[in-house]
Amino acid sequence: MTGAYTAPVMQAGDTDEALMLRYAQGDAAAFDLLYARHRGGSFRYLLRHLGHDRALAEELFQDVWANLIGARERYQVEAKFTTWLYTLAHNRLVDHYRRQRPLELVSLHAEDEDDDPPDPPAPATAQPERQAQARQGAARLLALVEALPAAQREAFLLHEEGGLSVDQIARITGTDREAIKSRLRYAVAKQRRGMEDLL
């Protein structure tokens, strides 16, 4: 068929940075792949910071990606793409909390008790009690994350949801590397202690 549009071939191994540079040059398919790779982690990062207020998380999530789209032509590879993306998300959270209550960084209580975390995938042969244990474990872990002090929760979520290194987290939060390492150690230790009876 003549005149048919052929989308550029995207390789699964394309780096995020290469995709963002392509998007900055007008390649919409590169953006689609970036979005598919990072929408889940970036949304969960916001959602867990906001006490599981899904509507607010969706609003901020849209803002973060709109900011990314707006900044595409100025994008330069100065760090990993994920560092830049989570810096946008972190800054949007900071802006939100400054407008709400100065110095209050995170709500520690879920607004919607019916908004359970997703269950981990289970094999079809899983017994009901194992599924119940998995749900209980996921709910406990979520409660433990929400109960962390704001600075520890920030470092923990950037590490677990964003897959960011200690150095990247330090850069995003403007904190020194040793402080981030300490926050992560305390956060992980609290998670382990809180989950001991379920292991």
Image (cartoon, rainbow, N blue to C red):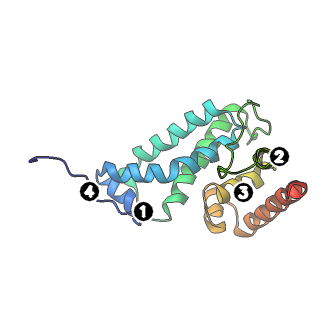
Q: Are marks 3 and 2 in contact (CB under 8 Å)?
A: no
Q: CA distance from mark 3 to mark 2?
A: 12 Å
Q: Mark 1 or mark 2, which has the lower sequence index? A: 1
Mark 4 or mark 2, whichever is nearer to me = 4
Q: Secondary structure at mark 3?
A: helix
Q: Amino acid at mark 2?
A: Ala
Q: CA distance from mark 1 to mark 3?
A: 24 Å
Q: Secondary structure at mark 2?
A: helix
Above or below for 13 versus 105 = below
Locate residue 93: give its quadrant.
top right
Q: CA distance from mark 1 to mark 2?
A: 34 Å
Q: Mark 4 or mark 1, which has the lower sequence index? A: 4
Above or below for 47 versus 157 = above
Q: Amino acid at mark 4?
A: Pro
* Residue 8: mark: 4
* Residue 156: mark: 3
Q: Are marks 4 and 2 in contact (CB under 8 Å)?
A: no
Q: Which residue is mark 2?
A: 147
- The crowding category of the residue bearing disc 4, from other C-alpha atoms within 10 Å (few below 14, some 14 to 19, many at least 20), is few
